[in-house]
Image (tube, rainbow, N blue to C red):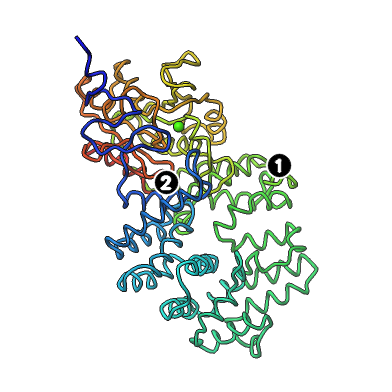
Amino acid sequence: MFKLTQYFSTKATPQSQPMPGTAQLPNSAGGYTWSVDDWVQLDRFLSLGSEGGTYYISERKLSIDNAEALVRCLGTDGPRVIARIVEISDAGRAPKNDPAIFALALAAKLGDEATRKAAYAALPKVCRIGTHLMHFAEYAQAFGGWGRGMRKAVASWFNARPADELALQLVKYQARDGWSTRDLLRLAHPRAASPSHDRLFAWVTKGALPEGAAADPALALLVAKDALARITSAREAANVIRTHRVPREAVPTELLAHAEVWEALLADMPMTAMIRNLATMTRVGLLTPGASATKTVVARLGDNARLAKARIHPVAVLAALLTYKSGRGARGSTTWSPIAQVIDALDAAFYATFKTIEPSGKRLLLALDVSGSMTCGTIAGVPGLTPRVGSAAMALVTAATEQDHTLVGFSAASGGFGGKWGGGESGLTTLAISPRQRLDDVVATINRVPMGGTDCALPMLWATRNKVDVDTFVVYTDNETWAGSVHPAQALRAYREARGIPAKLVVVGMISNGFTIADPNDAGMLDVVGFDTAVPPVISDFARA
Ligand code: CA
């Protein structure tokens, strides 16, 4: 018999060919996958951005692809785009706010009238601090000039907040990335909402304390900043900082060498700043083992309500943990002795920054794509946080609450499918990582796993061959699968038949490309986005249903 089916079968098609009768298209690795719909791609972009590109796709092309998907979404339903931007940005679900700001700026300039109106109305929700507003101005400039809508929205950003809150913004964020608040005020030209606002605008545009500043309580912070510039004693500076709740940005660099000054800053330090300055506070000698400042820091990191209110993202915590643990700055010139209690507190805070998961109680196979492409690029520009490391961290969040789980890593051997290493299954290995382990150890373990080509069908093939009962496969991947002799969707259907289990598949996209191994016509397969803090509960809910 001539085996025609080796060339044409709906049950086993090599990944280098499209599955017959489907809308599969080539991915960047030469395999065939589905395209995610534009709304899924929008979610991927808002959460993962395009900074740094991927192993296969340049930063430039990835950015253009994402912007084009965004433009198509705007053409379909602009207000829905704005709602989605606000939903993800305002809840702090993404590691970085820039993709949301970019999308908002594009919508504000290129959307229809209803969309533009909604975009400007959403400005204070998405651009919550001065830096965000300057980034918005920079992006918006690429899509058009300063029209009436833009001027009105920016003017209201300054005028709508109480004068003392505005003073804090102006002191903290004077200039960023080629923009300053002075530029913004000059272009928006707001009519001051109050005499205090008027004085604040004058301070920004003239660069000196205006008349009446000393008598205006709303300007107290500006007066304190002015005083600090002339103070050399650390004790005196600490007093001013405490009394006027001065932020670090308003303190002259020379004073920042003193533990006493940092102690005063810590009293009112926002969570984001505290997490970013752990190394500095350790280096200047404020944080030492057993010190009361150390206890303060550890207690704040353990305060879930505080983490949520400050919109602390797990990626920020993970980045802080990896840097702090290393004991040296990115440029290598500064060093410190990390304190174990702080590292442990960061480790716990990482899990606490995800939305609460209600365990499904189902049998989960958490499968990490550990192939070569997953080690390229970084998540949110964090050094060392590759998609591979990021996916391990994401999988542990689910592993920490779902008792019945198995963790495996898959990567076809280099040169193609079917290789063997480490005595494990062909291209697949069980991973010796656990949520009880500290994340820096997990990262080290994951980085030691050998890698090769990609075959996203391996978890299903492995579970079939080894008769492992799985209710839901969760695959963390860039969807650039190519090396397998069957497609992942086919392998899942074969698994369902072989084990008599209506198993599901969740694909956690770790890269903002447009590909997916999930069959859009199969209700048992779901696409979600890696490092969206709302995703772990979604995985458990889908597994439970
Ligand atoms: Ca790969």
Q: Residues within 10 Å of mark 1 (few under 14, many from 20)?
A: some
Where residue 81 sits in the image (x, y, percent)? 33, 61
Give the numbered dot on residue 337.
Answer: 1
Question: Of 324 and 285, which appears nearest the observer?
Answer: 324
The residue lying furthest to the front in this view is: 2
Label 2, secondary structure: give it: loop
Which residue was labeled with disc 2? 512
Q: Quadrant of residue 519?
A: top left
Q: Name the residue at 47% across, 38% down.
A: 393
The residue lying furthest to the top in this view is: 1
Q: Amino acid at mark 1?
A: Ser
Question: Mark 2 near mark 1, Cβ–Cβ under 8 Å?
Answer: no
**Tally of marks:** 2
Give the numbered dot on residue 229.
Answer: none
Q: Quadrant of residue 20?
A: top left
User: For this view, does 121 lie left or right of residue 200?
Assistant: left
Where residue 279 sits in the image (x, y, percent)? 66, 49
Please identify the quadrant where the N terminus is shown: top left
Where residue 407 sits in the image (x, y, percent)? 41, 27
Position above or below: 359 against 237? above
Where residue 56 sits in the image (x, y, percent)? 48, 39
The residue lying furthest to the right in this view is: 232
